[in-house]
Image (tube, rainbow, N blue to C red):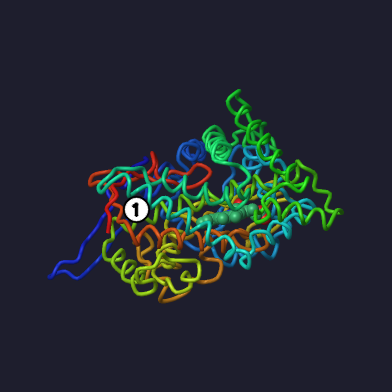
Amino acid sequence: MLSWLAAETQTIETLDSPRKRFEPAHPSYYSGKPGNQLQRLLTARRDFLSIWRQSDHKEVVNAVTLLGRQIIAVNSPEAIKYVVATRHENFERKTPQMRRALEYLLGDGLFISDGETWKQRRPLVADIVHKHRVPAFGDIMKNTSLELVERWNRLGDGASVNALYEMAGLTAEIISRSVFGNDLGEERAGMVTDGFTSYQSLIDSINIGYFLGFDDGLPLFKTPTLRRSVKRIHRIIDQVIEDHLAGRGDDNSMVELLVRRQQRNPELKLDVVALRNEAATIFMAGHETTAATLTWAWYLLSKAPWIEEAVHAEIEEVCGGNVPTVADVPKLKWCTAVIEETLRLYPPVPILARQAKQADRIGNLEVKPASLVMIVPWVLHRTPSLFPDPHLFKPERFIEKRPVPYSYIPFASGPRICPGLQFGLTEAILCLAVLAQRFRLRVPEGHKVEPVSRLTLRPRGGLPVTLHRR
Ligand code: HEM
């Protein structure tokens, strides 16, 4: 039966016991009846993180058949490399669940496209968010974080806030300014952000139709609220794009780069809808994930004060009294390790699911066409042979040694690797440094943190914290 490891466990240093140990919240291993896969599917629909047995946390490839559909869980670095890199073309297609859930909002945007569309658009989007461009967005990241510092200052010492909502607001503002420049204005930016949030809360996490034999899943059920959200987002983004096409947009935004690229390469045939799909994809892919990462990082630091001290000492040493900038990021080794360890324990995209195009073979396992192939960073990152003490928060592991290739994949890997990796990492490290220089966040004693997986992995109900000036 399902049970929850209710309390995280923490051991703090005392003179007698120099051990510092923190095991953050996670569900206990699945112990449902072997063979009852339907029960497991229903559990997955409610809580995808609780369906993993201890025996799944090995370097193995397992398969089950559910209502005639083959489901394969791939958990060894070698087999993961085969799926995401060697045989990328056979396993590049997202699952019907993902496509059905997102296509209404994102159309054929990069996140869910495949085949020729994906091949054509990938270089375009990758170029726009490429690591060489990240420094240009550094000031937006720093200044938006500073605005949050000022707001927190006004709330007063000890104020209570929900860290998930605070981080969601911060990263939405950063991506909005990066994608749209100054074009949106406060009111329309708020409308777009709220629209995305409401869309995500309305879509289902598992398309049952796929398991009932429909290879393309069942269409999304479009409620009036969902239709309204989507129409509003599309209208606003289309307007921004039309302004750019007419030469009236902010020159430094990602939308401007997209539009200029189309004007230089008309053979790309990106019309307003295609441009909107890519802009909306970058917007959506680019903020929820970073917000979740930062929220989990605050939880972990709040419960591991000895790591928090190392972070504070580092910020002091690298930046002195100055506000951290994007140029400081490569020197912030502890901040980086905290973010990397956060992404290991709580990968914002906890499952990478694909639909096999043709029959194949992963290791010794025969793969049938249209099988569901799952790589589950949530399980992979907690596999003891790859990460000793897998449930413990130990950022130093990333300072001491780099993970085995294909064992640590919070940004996926292979040709479909997250193109925003450098943007997202830099943003998370810089925002953490700017905020941690001024504030300590504390999760109230007794608050039960419970990870849940929707489109991203987040704490159920957010993360209540109190803010303390440093
Ligand atoms: C901590 C932050 C982030 C994490 C953990 C993350 C993670 C991921 C993962 C795992 C995927 C692959 C999903 C799959 O294959 O099923 C992905 C794809 C993608 N991400 Fe990120 N991401 C982050 C930030 C960003 C940012 C900041 C941007 C843009 C500025 C971005 C843009 C994208 C896009 C466009 C794709 C689709 C790529 C494709 O399919 O070719 N991401 N991301």
Residue displayed at 34% across by 53% down: 299
Is 188 placed left or right of 466 in the picture? right
Q: Residue furthest left?
A: 16
Query: On the rendered image, what quadrant is the C terminus found in?
Result: bottom left
Q: Residue 196: percent from the left, percent from the top?
A: 56, 38
Picture quarter with ligand 1:
bottom right
User: Could you tell me if residue 46 is visible in this image?
Assistant: yes
Is 208 placed left or right of 244 in the picture? left
Look at mark 1 in the image and give the residue it sits on.
299
Identify the amino acid type marked 1. Answer: Tyr
Q: Residue 350: percent from the left, percent from the top?
A: 50, 51
Residue displayed at 65% across by 44% down: 280
Query: On the rendered image, what quadrant is the N terminus found in?
Result: top left
Q: Residue 73: percent from the left, percent from the top?
A: 56, 53
* Viewer-side residue, 225 vs 148: 148
Q: Residue furthest top?
A: 224
